[in-house]
Image: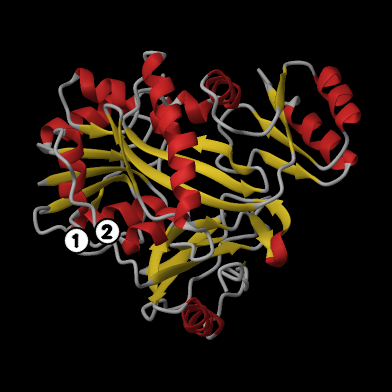
């Protein structure tokens, strides 16, 4: 098989590497990829993830057997629609189904209509109305930009001034729309499901760390680290999430003629009132993908083909081990990052590369999240210690990372 992975970050590096581990896969192309993706079987090709027509042409020319889409921007841009019209096999939702991520108000309307538990909310097209609503409700409160925001369009405002500032920032954008939600207390976790024609195949759950700094302080980011599975979330809670959240959402999308194929990401919170939905994404999350895929022991390429062809996939994962990953980012992330810095020798780490460029054979950061390192073992404490010992021994000057990833699991 020849596989095409669309995207350029650490998530796509992890997906491409997982496909490359299959004995049935000869070559994995990544468009556009990045210069850190240099393993055997992997080949980057400089075609933008948003150039759907060129990607489809490339898939035809290279006789690609399966295309897997990483980023939400490509999905909302209609890449799946283009590929299906060309008779190409692709795993991901059409643009109308990808609205479950692309429009928070659409996602909320689906949840409301089909009885999916989530936070109370209101949508606003007018800044003054939104500000008045926030004043009435008080803090803490959650402010979300309605459209795509690369995981950073959410402000958990613990005071009213932070909420006001977040709303003003949103309404400075063109075609601005804000969703204001009640603040939920509880334990957050991420549940990925592989979906096709109403059938749902869940993967091990993960826990992401969104805030920039230790102790869940600082601004929201695209994710500073994750681990999977999550030992303190019981299986009964995962089952509740599947039955009350994932299944009715997929059924609801089908009922709305927006049938979903691909990866449905459910960002969930286990509250005193049960499991509730924080958000949906229409693709694998970053950085959870890097740790979840490390747990998979079955042939992932075969699993995806089986799902698309209507066969039961033989999904298998390691239940005895835990994988923990730490993101290393440029100083200043998620706001304006500092300048490009040279990466240390990372040969002793299991790495997935994101924001990197190459100069004279040396990798440099290119801003934002730079790389993610993972470690796998049977005990989360020993895994933490082993990974942080390696990271702390490196010269990561000009970059930073959280030092408490996985603490809730401990």
* Neighbours of disc 1 within 10 Å: few (<14), some (14-19), many (20+): some
Depth check: 283 or 115 in front?
A: 115
Q: Residue at x 15, y 41 (%)?
A: 306
Mark linked to residue 1: none
Q: Residue at x 31, y 59 (%)?
A: 37
Depth check: 198 or 214 in front?
A: 198
Depth check: 318 or 175 in front?
A: 318
**Against 282, is 22 above or below?**
below
Q: Is 174 placed left or right of 60 in the picture?
A: right
Q: Residue at x 9, y 47 (%)?
A: 1
Q: CA distance from mark 2 to mark 1?
A: 6 Å
Q: Secondary structure at mark 2?
A: helix
Q: Is 46 placed left or right of 405 in the picture?
A: left
**Against 410, is 299 above or below?**
above
Which residue bears the numbered disc 1? 21
Which residue bears the numbered disc 2? 17
Q: Is 174 placed left or right of 58 in the picture?
A: right
Q: Is 301 placed left or right of 203 in the picture?
A: left
Marks 2 and 1 in Cβ contact (< 8 Å): yes
State the count of labels.
2
């Amino acid at each position: 098989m020849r596989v095409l992975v669309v995207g350029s970050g650490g998530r796509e590096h992890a997906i491409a590497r997982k496909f490359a581990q299959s004995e049935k896969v000869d070559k994995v192309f990544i468009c556009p990829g990045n210069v850190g993706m240099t393993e055997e079987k992997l080949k980057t090709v400089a075609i933008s993830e948003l150039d759907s027509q060129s990607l489809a042409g490339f898939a035809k020319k290279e006789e690609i057997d399966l295309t897997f889409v990483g980023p939400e921007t490509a999905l909302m841009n209609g890449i799946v629609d283009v590929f299906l019209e060309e008779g190409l096999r692709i795993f991901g939702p059409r643009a109308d189904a990808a609205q479950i991520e692309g429009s928070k108000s659409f996602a909320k309307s689906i949840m409301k209509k089909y009885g999916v538990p989530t936070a109370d909310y209101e949508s606003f097209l007018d800044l003054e109305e939104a500000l008045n609503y926030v004043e009435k409700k008080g803090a803490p409160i959650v402010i979300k930009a309605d459209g795509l925001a690369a995981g950073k369009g959410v402000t958990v405002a613990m005071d009213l001034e932070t909420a006001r500032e977040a709303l003003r920032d949103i309404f400075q954008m063109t075609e601005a729309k804000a969703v204001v939600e009640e603040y939920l207390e509880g334990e957050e976790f991420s549940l990925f499901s592989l979906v096709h024609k109403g059938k749902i195949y869940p993967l091990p759950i993960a826990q992401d760390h969104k805030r920039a700094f230790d102790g869940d302080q600082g601004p929201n980011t695209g994710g500073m680290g994750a681990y999977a599975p999550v030992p303190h979330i019981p299986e009964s809670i995962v089952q509740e999430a599947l039955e009350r959240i994932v299944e009715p959402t997929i059924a609801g999308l089908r009922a709305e003629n927006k049938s979903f194929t691909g990866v449905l990401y459910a960002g969930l919170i286990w509250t005193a009132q049960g499991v509730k939905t924080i958000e949906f994404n229409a693709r694998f999350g970053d950085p959870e993908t890097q740790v979840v895929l490390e747990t998979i022991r079955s042939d992932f390429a075969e699993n995806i083909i089986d799902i698309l062809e209507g066969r039961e996939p033989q999904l298998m994962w390691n239940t005895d081990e835990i994988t923990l990953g730490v993101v290393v980012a440029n100083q200043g992330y998620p706001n304006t990052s500092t300048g490009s810095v040279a990466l240390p020798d990372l040969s002793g780490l299991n790495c997935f590369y994101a924001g990197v460029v190459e100069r004279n054979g040396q990798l440099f950061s290119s801003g934002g999240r730079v790389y993610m390192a993972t470690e796998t073992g049977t005990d989360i404490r020993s895994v933490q210690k082993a990974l942080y010992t390696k990271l702390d021994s490196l010269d990561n000057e000009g970059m930073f990372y959280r030092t408490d990833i996985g603490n809730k699991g401990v």
